Amino acid sequence: MSLFGFIITLALICLRVPIGFALAGLAIICTYLFFGYKSGDEFQAAKALYPTLALISSNVFEFLHSYPLSMVPLFIALGHIAYHAEITTDIYFAVRVWLARVPGGLAMASAIGCTGFSAITGSSLACASAMGRICIPEMMRFNYSPQLATSTVAIGGTLGALIPPSILFIMYGLFTEQSINKLFLAGVIPGLLSLMGILTVVFVWSKLKPEDAPIADETYSARERWQATFRAWPAFSLFLVIIGGIYGGIFTATEAAAVSMLIALAYGVLAKKLSWEHFLQAMKDTALQSATIFFIAVCAKMFVAFVSLTGLTHDLINLIEHYQMSDWAILIMIALIYLVMGMFLDPLGIMLLTLPFVIPLIEGMGYDLIWFGVVVVKLLEIGLITPPVGLNVFIINSVVNNTIPVHTIFRGVINFLAMDLVIFALILIFPILSLFLPNSL
């Protein structure tokens, strides 16, 4: 029955039913039917009602009262406050003055700026939207090609999924009961590798097609460069609090979220960069995004309870053992499923829809779930730029007010996809890239 529910859920999502309603509706109905037919062939509606409500309500209550869940609104608030206080934009301008005379320097600065933004906000879509408004007009002003300017920010925005603090890592940790501290640390090296891949593609592109990335006709003195770097100290401080605090054992991930948000708020107020109107707007956006994520997560938790009830995952494990599939065949199959689903669905929905099925498989194979979390998030990151429904591409298209066609952005993004797949292969083949920092705690 859970396999039937999974197929119906996918069908409803394809029909543009919001994923939360699709997950919750199918979970409640199928759980009710399961209990109704449990005692025999005749459906017993009255007896099925109480266990259905008890199972659903207990799982929802337990999930919403999870202490680490408070990280989600805290990190989202941190991102909005940092944006309005101009903390995130200072990162870009600090890097920009150092790379002004490098081929593709503005595009490289955009990618590094996206990395810095990601290290504060944890949201790929927010990163693409905010940095797109800053970086793309600047590159177009210096006659960069539309393909390079837009695709660099689109791919750079995906780093928000991998570089901590990542909302996807938080939700993965909550649903798989893994340490979010370790997940954050596990994403650092793969995230930096992804950044290096982006910078490599930009450099090669600029060398092969110098007309697409003219060198900026501007120079900066050493004093100006260091002044710009110093102005970015709030961003570096926040990253140090989040990663250094967690790695040094000073903070838990939840405490790091609270402390970093308070630091950003204090800086914005004391530096007079955060007005009361901007603060209220940041809180409004935080409430809206948090409520959306919580709703989808709660509905997914209902679906997880239903899948666990039916025992489908055990049947899948037995089926794989029967056909004697190799571990690599299973991993490649899972990767292809994520890549295909990433072409059509949003990352959070894909993850919450598939985890009930794939986690028992991976756990049964003896693989580390921290490492697999990085694998999943990297695949979801690739899905953000994969046609036909690469969310980051459409966000960039809206940022430029449709002046640059979607197909132009996709053509540019394709140049980065091959490098992204190489990075994914390295993460898959060498788990130590993900596990080195978590294991050194």
Image (spheres, grey):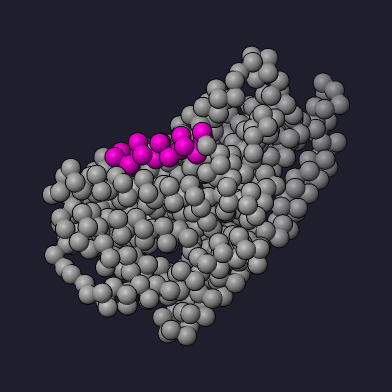
Towards the viewer: 26 or 363: 363
- SS assignment for the magenta stretch, majority: helix
Q: Residue 332, how many percent across, how many down?
A: 51, 27
Q: Is residue 265 left or right of residue 310?
A: left
- Residue 207 can be seen, yes or no: yes
Q: Residue at x 74, y 29 (%)?
A: 311
Q: Is residue 92 above or below residue 311?
A: below
Q: Is residue 105 above or below residue 277?
A: above
Q: Residue at x 71, y 20 (%)?
A: 318
Span shown in magenta: 414-429
Q: Is residue 365 left or right of residue 329?
A: right
Query: Does the magenta portion include 293?
Result: no
Q: Is residue 173 left or right of residue 129?
A: right
| Quarter containing the N terminus | top right
**How many marks overall?**
0
The part of the image, by quadrant, that contains residue 247 is bottom right
Which residue extends farthest top? 323
Towards the viewer: 178 or 281: 178
The part of the image, by quadrant, that contains residue 383 is top left
